[in-house]
Amino acid sequence: MTLVILSACVDLKDGICTTSCPVDCIYEGERMFYIHPTECIECGMCESICPVDAIRYDDEVPEGEEAYAQLNTAVFQLPDGTVNEPGGWSKGMAPLRDPPALAEMATEASKEKELS
Ligand code: SF4
Ligand code: SF4
């Protein structure tokens, strides 16, 4: 079990959660932040600090958010299938490239919002 960042972070990305993480395992991507699946020590400090409730334990992911939860692993996956372990995020690092699936998912979500 680990923690994951979900859709509410997309394009908000204020970075507040990074200030609470004792091991700097919350990484900035182009459109959202991601929690590293193996560097996270599951302390739970970041969960309550997010102003839009985007952070959850991976066994408490709400319905419809599963694909966003998976992005937290996909973004660190190397072409050979191993997991990239950068060893900690710091301000000023180049953002990770978002998995291509994020663009599709975010477009779908904004279309649904427009229709509702
Ligand atoms: S605090 Fe929430 S919205 Fe802000 S960067 Fe972290 S996960 Fe995203
Ligand atoms: S649960 Fe703790 S270690 Fe994991 S991302 Fe949140 S603050 Fe960092």
Image (tube, rainbow, N blue to C red):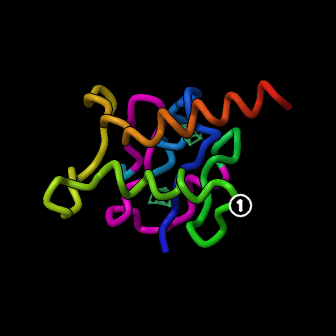
For the view shown, which residue lies furthest in the right direction?
A: 116
Q: Main secondary structure of the magenta part?
A: loop
Q: Position of residue 76 (x, y in %)?
A: 29, 52
Q: Which is nearer the eye, 102 or 39?
A: 102
60 left or right of 79 in image: right
107 falls in the magenta region: no
Q: Quadrant of residue 39?
A: bottom left
115 left or right of 107 in image: right
Q: Residue at x 52, y 62 (%)?
A: 3
Note whether ligand 1 is within 8 Å of mark 1: no
Q: Position of residue 42 (x, y in %)?
A: 48, 68
- Where the C terminus falls, by quadrant? top right
**Residue holding disc 1:** 63
Q: Residue at x 78, y 24 (%)?
A: 114
42 falls in the magenta region: yes
Amino acid type, label 1: Glu
Q: Position of residue 97 (x, y in %)?
A: 31, 35
Position of 103 relative to 44 (above/below): above
Q: Residue at x 49, y 75 (%)?
A: 1
Q: Position of residue 101 (x, y in %)?
A: 44, 42
Label 1 neighbour load within 10 Å: few <14, some 14-19, many 20+:
few
41 left or right of 107 in image: left
Secondary structure of the residue carrying tag 1 is loop
Q: Residue at x 71, y 61 (%)?
A: 63
What's drawn in magenta, residue-wise? 26-48
